[in-house]
Amino acid sequence: MLGKTWISALALTLAASVAGAQTAAPPAAPPPANPVDAASIQALQAMGTHLQSLQRFSVSTEVTGERVLADGQKLQHSARAVVDVARPNRLRARMTGPRTERELFYDGKAVTLFTPAQKYYSTVEFSGSVAELVSRLQERYGVEVPLSDLFLWGTAAAPIDRIQSAMYVGPAVIGGERTDQYAFRQGNFDWQLWMTTGDKPLPRKLVIVNRADEARPQSVSLIIWNLRPAFTDAAFRFTPPKGGSRIELVPLKAQ
Amino acid sequence: MKKQYGKWLLVPALSLAWVAMMLPSAEAADRKGGGGGAAARAGGGTKPNVKAGNNRADSRTNNVRSTSVTNVNNNVNVNKNVNVNVDANRGCCNGWDNDYHPIATAAAVTATVAVTSAIVGSIVSAPPPGCVPVNYGGMIYQQCGATWYQPQGTQFIVVNPPY
């Protein structure tokens, strides 16, 4: 009896305060009917089309990533990479992580992973586009090419229909360059993209939040572009160094 | 007689001072795994390839439950096709930036490994003889039976088996 009175009294108070808040607050814009903003998707597609049209380029990136410890404490780490590309089928990447330095060579015939410190290399025959290489390396060998999205945006491997939310955030300046900021949501991943303004958009910054863990580890990648690289095709061919030894590249095991 | 003693004492004192002066660069050379030339170079500025101290990282840093990801498209594919948590995929898909990932495994694995072989996280200057180098998940390892080593600068750290 007493409980009931209390509950109805509480309900009344709550209702009154909610009504009060509603009348006091400025009129907010109603949420969009479709969380996927068409103009943002269009901007992403335009960037993808431009990326796929680039024949020779070199990008350097600095990434800050996070790992989550058992108790939820987060640790940050940094890595750098330089990726040289000559379409359709040449790619070279130099990756410097917290512990190791690694290189990847692809000359259209074979792909080689090389660790200069130990002079170990693993070579596998492969022919295909750089986009095919990036997907194959990840799926079969668990090897992620830095900035792999660059090769997938604008292709069927980056389907637009998986994006559950897209919005334009506003203008921003990254490294002194004018960009537009967009935010997307896709499964467990929230990601933001800063692309240069104008009719030749390039991604300058990418932030990905992993929502699968409540600690939400985040990566931040800054991307610097060189559209007039000096490399020649010979730079993509791997020549084993003196004293180097070839080791096995083990495909991913089913876990 | 007293004077002579004094002279004899002076020699070891001087040589001690000389050793003390030389120690910092000797240490630097040791860290770099190089010779006298390396010591001379390391004496000046800090070179980026000179690895910081021999100290072992706190064991708690080995107990990683998840990581950030560095690409949008492949991770979504992983989620859709395999329908597993990215983090459950040991040694896979943790990002090109994360060369810590072999120790990002379940605590249970750590415990089993610790009983039978070298402790995960411990550091040695060289793996024991008879190890086999393996390239897995984009990382180089030295597999020595049940123990796996990952190069870290000029040293090697014991990690959980990547598979």
Image (tube, rainbow, N blue to C red):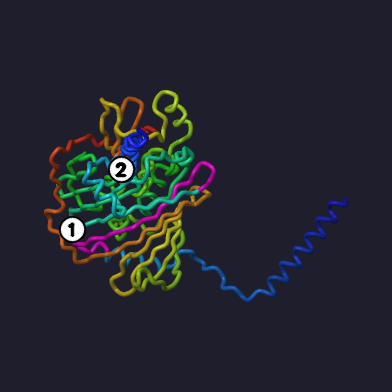
Judge whether residue A139 is colored magenta. Answer: no
**Chain at numbered mark 2:** B
Q: Viewed as shown, does residue A175 lie left or right of B112?
A: left
User: Do marks 1 and 2 share a subunit?
Assistant: no
Q: Residue at x 81, y 58 (%)?
A: A8
Q: Which residues are magenta?
A: A51-73
- Residue placed under numbered mark 1 in the picture: A86
Work out whether residue A37 or residue A200 is closer to the camera in this orientation and state it: A200
Residue B153 appearing in the image? no
**Chain at numbered mark 1:** A
Q: Amino acid at mark 1?
A: Ala
Measured from the top left, where is residue B5 in percent x and y? 35, 34
Q: Viewed as shown, does residue A188 lie left or right of A18?
A: left
Residue A45 appearing in the image? yes
Q: Amino acid at mark 2?
A: Trp
Q: Whole-Å distance between the Cαs marked 1 and 2?
A: 57 Å
- Residue placed under numbered mark 2 in the picture: B18
Q: Residues within 10 Å of mark 1 (few under 14, many from 20)?
A: many
Local secondary structure at mark 1: strand
Measured from the top left, where is residue A117 in percent x and y? 24, 42
Q: Is residue A25 above or below residue A220?
A: below
Local secondary structure at mark 2: helix
Q: Is residue A68 above or below residue B115?
A: below
Q: Residues within 10 Å of mark 2 (few under 14, many from 20)?
A: few
Measured from the top left, where is residue B57 in percent x and y? 43, 40
Outermost residue toward the top in this view: B116
Q: Viewed as shown, does residue B101 lie left or right of A146?
A: right
Q: Quadrant of the C terminus of chain B?
A: top left
Q: In terms of image quadrants, where is residue B118?
A: top left
Q: Is residue B54 above or below residue B68?
A: above
